Image (cartoon, rainbow, N blue to C red):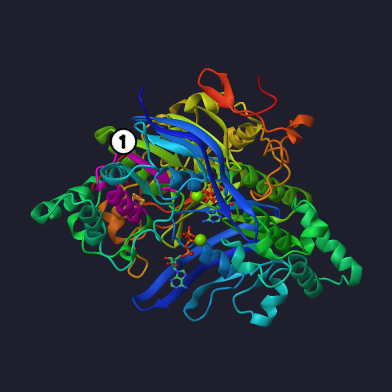
């Protein structure tokens, strides 16, 4: 398979308060292959959204780079930059906040077309209708405002807007967390259909680990700004190596009372450290049931442990 | 087991510009002492309004209790005055709200908020109050409880705030704990810690629990009985086994079919329920689920199905359980 996106030693720091630096993304390297779905999981605040935003050029990195088809996305200029804007899109975490409440659906999607001068005149209207049909909305939805839709429909508007410019790569940032289960399933089915028809590549950020396994070919697990494990999705779920991933997977609730009655959870004690003052060694040390002395002192290296299976832990290899 | 709570035919409406929203349309259920039940159902189906009614926290206006009774410990709560309710809230009934920031006071140190609560509802005084508050913070698994006692809510992370709220809800050993989506914003490792804590309370102190959640996995692991709501009504209720393996209502079936299957079948195409729930200003005359139901019959559109009892614990409201409904009937055009 061919690499589409290469994230290389990416860092994104924020300045918070006086002389305090928050390391939201702290040295992340991942390749994303054409046509695949890379799942990204990890607890609230571990840097998933910041990573996604930096990849699609909404943030400038503090250090490191992102290559798209070999091109450094943050250095691109002129025509190249314009082309990148079209190829990389993002569906935002909050469907309520990301749509302008004063614009109709027609205007929201039309705006994206106009910026890139994609379709004018009668073509413009046709293209909008085509996009609405593609995401399962219909023509009479075009003149309505965002607040007149349900959460799931609003999420579809966001998807239609992202698709308007014919992207190849879409960062889907928790596209389903705000929805209830039956609407979640509607949106996930739609994303899968579109991927099949249009050959899209996704970075899929989510909290729901069952859904991530369902949709992803590979999964990256983040903890406090770092990727701690990366593997094919079946491999990761069947053979997790990092203690955090193990705890995470052992805690996935399964919608089956008999399975739930049988299982053993790894219950972690302790809290997530602050990204402003991360511990000097392994970020997970404060909660890790297997921590050793060196975990407090040295940052474990992220390396290949099994076939295409990467992890960062002193206990491994 | 002894009944602790009994909700009978609860109806709650809200007045809005668009019209009268019939948020809760005749909800009934019981809860035994020491029992943990879950309430599930689509967004907007009335779960939070039902829970807030038990605490008598519905703002009025725009809300109104139209009918029904809520017996807690043998006494009907609905006719009680605000003053009487204040002696019950926090003491006999604790509540964890959907959004922790709304119930913690941002201007007051966390420890102090627990102390206020204890002073109001217990005989504890002086040092004993503080000791108890610190004890509660430790009990919910906050590291450094002495230090946390002196901090403000904004100095806590999301997960810690949630736990502080649980500490407060539990400080006076309530007999009933209502937890409204207590873990939705948290990652599964923190979620597991909190569920474990609630389970312990139930086992050690015999606290009864009502858990509201849309995570069917959490329901499967936590509750012994499940109440399924749709459009302001209970459509099915039963033991966790009855609801997951022997459900009879098409909505319950649709809800369970929407989540990814565990294990090898995980990649199978998902099966959502098509369409959306009806508006509650003009809910359908018959069964509220008929416009989305693949087995609806003519009668479903016209007449509301009664609640039918299938076992000691299993109740369902669907015309398909009627003896005249043909097996597999699908009369819809
Ligand atoms: N613009 C910003 N300025 C300062 N700090 C920020 C900013 N954006 C994010 N952060 C901080 O960076 C860290 C990572 O945040 P991010 O939103 O990427 O997390 P996340 O993994 O997406 O979390 P969630 O699951 O809650 O969406 C957090 O500690 C957050 O508070
Ligand atoms: N103050 C209010 N004014 C008008 N309508 C209201 C008010 N509060 C709730 N409602 C309506 O009552 C219905 C039930 O709301 P409720 O909050 O109980 O839903 P829920 O089942 O808890 O949903 P969710 O899963 O999204 O939390 C909804 O249709 C809601 O719009
Ligand atoms: S009563 Fe009719 S419409 Fe309602 S769930 Fe049963 S079969 Fe479907
Ligand atoms: Mg995020
Ligand atoms: Mg609610």
Residue range of the region highlighted in magenta in the rendering: A152-176
Q: Residue at x 56, y 37 (%)?
A: A27
Q: Name the residue carrying label 1.
A: A200
Q: Residue at x 38, y 58 (%)?
A: A98
In the rendered structure, the answer to whether residue B318 lies left or right of residue A83 reads right
In the rendered structure, the answer to whether residue B317 lies left or right of residue B222 reads left
Residue B14 among those drawn in magenta:
no
Tell me if residue B138 comes above or below residue A25 in the rendering. Answer: below
Quadrant in the rendering for residue A185: top left
**Is label 1 in a helix, a strand or a loop?**
loop
Residue A171 among those drawn in magenta:
yes
**Rendering coords of residue B282 (x, y %):** 32, 69
Quadrant in the rendering for residue A291: top right
- Label 1 chain ID: A
Q: Residue at x 28, y 52 (%)?
A: A161
**Ligand 4: does it lie within 8 Å of the C-beta at label 1?**
no
**Rendering coords of residue B85 (x, y %):** 67, 76
**Rendering coords of residue A277 (x, y %):** 69, 49
């Amino acid at each position: 398979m061919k690499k589409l996106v290469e994230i290389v030693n990416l860092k994104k720091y924020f300045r918070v308060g006086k002389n305090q630096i928050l390391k939201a993304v702290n040295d992340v390297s991942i390749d994303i292959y054409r046509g695949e779905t890379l799942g990204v999981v990890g607890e609230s605040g571990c840097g998933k959204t910041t990573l996604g935003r930096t990849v699609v050029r909404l943030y400038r990195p503090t250090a490191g780079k992102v290559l798209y088809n070999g091109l450094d996305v943050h250095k691109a200029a002129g025509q190249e930059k314009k082309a990148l804007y079209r190829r990389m899109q993002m569906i935002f975490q909050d469907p309520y906040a990301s749509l302008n409440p004063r614009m109709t659906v027609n205007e929201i999607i039309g705006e994206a077309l106009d910026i890139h001068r994609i379709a004018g005149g009668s073509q413009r209207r046709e293209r909008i209708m085509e996009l609405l049909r593609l995401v399962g909305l219909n023509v009479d939805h075009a003149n309505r405002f965002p607040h007149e839709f349900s959460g799931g429909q609003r999420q579809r508007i966001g998807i239609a807007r992202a698709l308007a410019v014919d992207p190849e790569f879409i960062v889907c940032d928790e596209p389903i967390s705000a929805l209830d289960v039956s609407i979640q399933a509607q949106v996930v089915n739609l994303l899968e259909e579109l991927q099949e028809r249009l050959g899209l590549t996704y970075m899929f950020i989510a909290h729901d680990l069952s859904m991530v396994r369902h949709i992803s070919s590979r999964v990256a697990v983040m903890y406090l700004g770092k990727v701690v494990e990366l593997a094919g999705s079946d491999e990761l779920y069947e053979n997790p190596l990092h203690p955090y991933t193990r705890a995470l997977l052992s805690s996935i609730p399964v919608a089956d009372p008999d399975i739930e009655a049988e299982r053993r959870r790894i219950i972690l004690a302790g809290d997530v450290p602050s990204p402003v003052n991360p511990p000097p060694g392994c970020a997970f040390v404060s909660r890790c049931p297997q921590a050793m002395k060196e975990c407090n002192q040295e940052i474990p290296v992220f390396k290949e442990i099994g076939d295409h299976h990467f992890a960062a832990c002193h206990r491994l290899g | 087991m002894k009944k602790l709570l009994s909700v009978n035919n609860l109806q709650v409406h809200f007045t809005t510009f668009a019209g009268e929203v019939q948020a809760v349309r005749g909800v009934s259920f019981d809860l035994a002492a020491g029992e943990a039940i879950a309430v599930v159902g689509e967004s907007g189906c009335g779960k939070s309004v039902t829970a807030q009614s038990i605490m008598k926290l519905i703002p009025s206006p725009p809300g109104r209790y139209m009918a029904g009774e809520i017996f807690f410990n043998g006494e009907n709560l609905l006719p009680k005055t605000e003053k009487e309710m204040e002696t019950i809230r926090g003491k006999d009934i604790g509540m964890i709200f959907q959004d922790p920031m709304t119930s913690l006071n941002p201007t007051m140190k966390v420890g102090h908020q627990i102390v206020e609560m204890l002073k109001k509802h217990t005989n504890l005084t002086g040092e004993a109050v503080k000791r108890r508050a610190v004890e509660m913070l430790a009990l919910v698994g906050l590291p450094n409880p002495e230090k946390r006692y002196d901090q403000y809510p904004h100095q806590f992370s999301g997960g810690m705030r949630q736990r502080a709220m649980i500490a407060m809800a539990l400080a006076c050993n309530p007999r009933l704990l209502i937890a409204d989506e207590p873990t939705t914003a948290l990652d599964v490792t923190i979620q597991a810690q909190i569920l474990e804590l609630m389970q312990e309370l139930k086992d050690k102190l015999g606290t009864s629990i009502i858990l509201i959640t849309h995570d069917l996995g959490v329901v499967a692991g936590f509750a012994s009985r499940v109440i399924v709501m749709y459009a302001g009504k209970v459509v099915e209720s039963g033991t966790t086994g009855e609801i997951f393996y022997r459900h009879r209502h098409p909505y319950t079936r649709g809800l369970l079919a929407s989540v990814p299957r565990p294990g090898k079948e995980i990649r199978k195409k998902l099966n959502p329920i098509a369409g959306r729930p009806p508006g509650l200003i003009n809910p359908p005359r018959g069964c509220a689920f008929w416009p989305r139901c693949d087995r609806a019959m003519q009668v479903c559109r016209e007449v509301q199905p009664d609640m039918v009892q299938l076992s000691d614990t299993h109740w369902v409201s669907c015309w398909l359980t009627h003896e005249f409904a043909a097996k597999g009937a699908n009369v819809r055009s």
